[in-house]
Image (tube, rainbow, N blue to C red):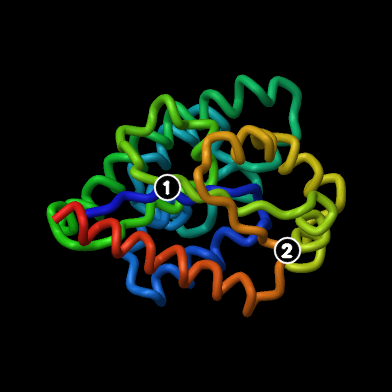
Amino acid sequence: MIRVGLTGGIAAGKSTVAARLAYDGAKVVDYDRLTHQVLGPGGAGVDPVLDRFGRDCADAEGGVDRSVLAAKVFGGSGKDQARHDLDAIVHPLVYDLAGQVEEPWLHRPLVVVHDVPLLAEVGDSIPFAFDHVIAVEAPDELRIARMVNGRHMTRAEAVARIGSQTSQETRRHMADLIVDGSEPIEQMFEFIDRVYVRLRSEEDRYR
């Protein structure tokens, strides 16, 4: 098995890259989806998050309303401590689920991609070693436009989200493969397809 870490700035195109790798044949561990599971109805993170951030963060189904939570974590005073507290609750639970998802693929001839939005921020705590790291990057103004137009954020909210993440330079430094998320989709897919073929050939050599 080849284990790949996939990361990138918000709205840079990381989800598109993950979907293409899955189309090519990779197995993808989606950390956003696991976070939704942790914070959804019955999730192990619901009560600890509500205890820390307030019962007004609950949604009608018994999970966490992520928009309310995000406003508190990214927009309020003391946001650094709030972010630290949220990460301390959620990350260990997500890592545990990621291990469960990956377990059936261990020791098999597969490319397994861990789609981790904040890999640069959690690199010291994540309990997985990656053979390769792919970073998806795009200019900040393009990312802001995508968030405003596609996610219905205000410009200030989009800028705050970018500011809450580590810099592009840091992500580029930790990655050995960079995907340009501003490229035309066909050109991006051609590059990703070549990357996948390379990863599969590398996995074959390891067997």
Label 2 neighbour load within 10 Å: few <14, some 14-19, many 20+: some
Q: Quadrant of residue 70?
A: top right
Residue 79 horizontal/vertical position (percent): 68, 26
Residue corresponding to mark 1: 5
Q: Is residue 34 left or right of residue 70?
A: left
Instruction: Work out which quarter of the rendered image holds the C terminus and state it.
Output: bottom left
Q: How many marks?
A: 2
Residue 126 horizontal/vertical position (percent): 37, 33
Compared to residue 180, the image places residue 126 above or below, namely above
Residue 201 horizontal/vertical position (percent): 29, 63
Q: Is residue 22 left or right of residue 136?
A: left
Between 43 and 19, the residue placed more toward the observer is: 19
Instruction: Work out which quarter of the rendered image holds the N terminus and state it.
Output: bottom left
Residue 72 visible to the viewer: no
Q: Residue 17: which disc?
A: none
Compared to residue 202, the image places residue 94 above or below, namely above
Between 54 and 86, the residue placed more toward the observer is: 86
Q: Amino acid at mark 2?
A: Ser
Compared to residue 182, the image places residue 130 above or below, namely above
At horizontal 42% and vertical 25% (from top left) the residue drawn is 124
At horizontal 43% and vertical 51% (from top left) the residue drawn is 31
Q: Residue 182: which disc?
A: 2
